[in-house]
Image (cartoon, grey):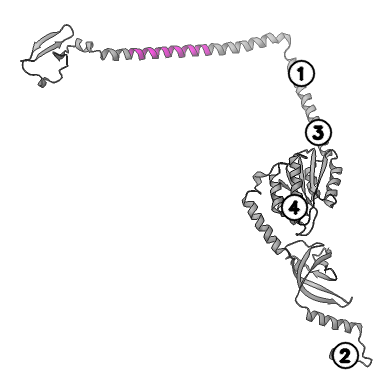
Amino acid sequence: MEAMFPERKDNSLTVTQLTNLIKNMLENSFQNILLKGEISNFKPSSAGHLYFSLKDADAQISAVMFRGSASNLTFQPKDGTMVQARGKISVYAPRGNYQLIIISMEKAGTGNIMEMIEQRKRKLAAEGLFDSARKRTLPYFPKTVGIVTSPGGAALRDILNIRKRRNDKVEIIVLPSLVQGDTAAPTIVNMIQIANRHKLCDVLIVGRGGGSLEDLLPFSEESVVRAIAASEIPVVSAVGHEIDWALSDFAADCRAPTPSAAAEIVIPEKTAILNEIDACKTNLYGEITERTRSLRLLLKSFDPENMHTRLLNIEQRLSERFDRAFDSLKSSMEELIKDRRRTIEHSREILENCNPQSIFERGYSMVTDRDGNIIRDAHKLNSGDQIKIRPAKGEIEATVN
């Protein structure tokens, strides 16, 4: 160790010398560190660099992630997020501070959770719980809005403030529920079922404010997702901040990026509605006024002097239509009768031609044996057979020779 210090008569070091010694020792000894901790005092810069601290229960260290490395992040860092960071120690000599320069970073402890959520998502999607065809339109003007959330959370306060600002005529029913921890999911399910069983509201907001992936896990529980999908009341899922998500977002009829945004979606703005009503009233009044003016102008044209002429013109047109229709019907009936007569005459001629008496009149005769059987073949007769010959008139008995 003594070789590291320069020889001086008083064996003393300058501040710069000591700092440089510490800088060399730290930077050479900690080139590739894998550190796990919670983000605190997160301050992104306008240049794209990220400044924050990593801490645990007993200590903290300053950290920086420069823009080039930060552009590769797959999540949005924020205070309270547990991360696993890889980097190196750097000493800033002018201030005598040391910090961790982070090269890469990912959320800590979320790998197994994310895999579990993705598996659950695939399972529920295969059952059709996320199909867009199942989703219903939210009511335009709900009388009552139900909120399933923590009664002491910031999410509820935000919703109530927005309701006060947008439309104080909308009633709010708070369905108190835990929103974090192992017992949160059953209470969320219970509140959704109570709201449906007693038809407490026209639309439900289910959610909470932001938090870590573990904090938001109850809203990805299978029981919560199924309760939302089975709800007869339309549901808006409002979990966390814009970058957060849960499986409840996919099952709900509508997904809001924040609880405040859910309130904006669900609660119509009273002023806008009143303005729309006034505009409709003005348009309706204008339409009625214009229609009335048109009718008055029309009525002025029906004075007593020309009413008779108008009626005669109408009667004449109708009479002409009637006459044309009558002539056309008469002509059609006459043509139909002629056609039927021709058909009857033709049928009569056919029947007469088929009459055996008509054939006899043309000189033909019919030959039968004694029993009346018609003789069609002369070779079937024998000499001495008695036959009968029937001409057009009378009957002849003969003997075959």
Q: Position of residue 70 (x, y in %)?
A: 76, 66
The 10 Å Cα crowd at callout 2, few under 14, some 14 to 19, many 20 or more, is few
Callout 1, which amino acid?
Answer: Arg
Instruction: Give the mark, 4 or 2, whose residue is nearer the N terminus.
Output: 2
Say above or below: 268 vs 280: below
Q: Position of residue 369 (x, y in %)?
A: 13, 15
Q: Which residue is labeled 2 in the image?
A: 6
Q: Which residue is labeled 3 in the image?
A: 277
Could you tell me which residue is drawn at 58 percent across and 10 percent down? 319
Callout 2, which amino acid?
Answer: Pro
Give the secondary structure at mark 3. helix
Say above or below: 219 vs 1: above
Q: Which residue is labeled 4 in the image?
A: 185
The image quarter containing residue 375 is top left
What's drawn in magenta, residue-wise? 325-345
Task: Specify whether 343 is left or right of 235.
Answer: left
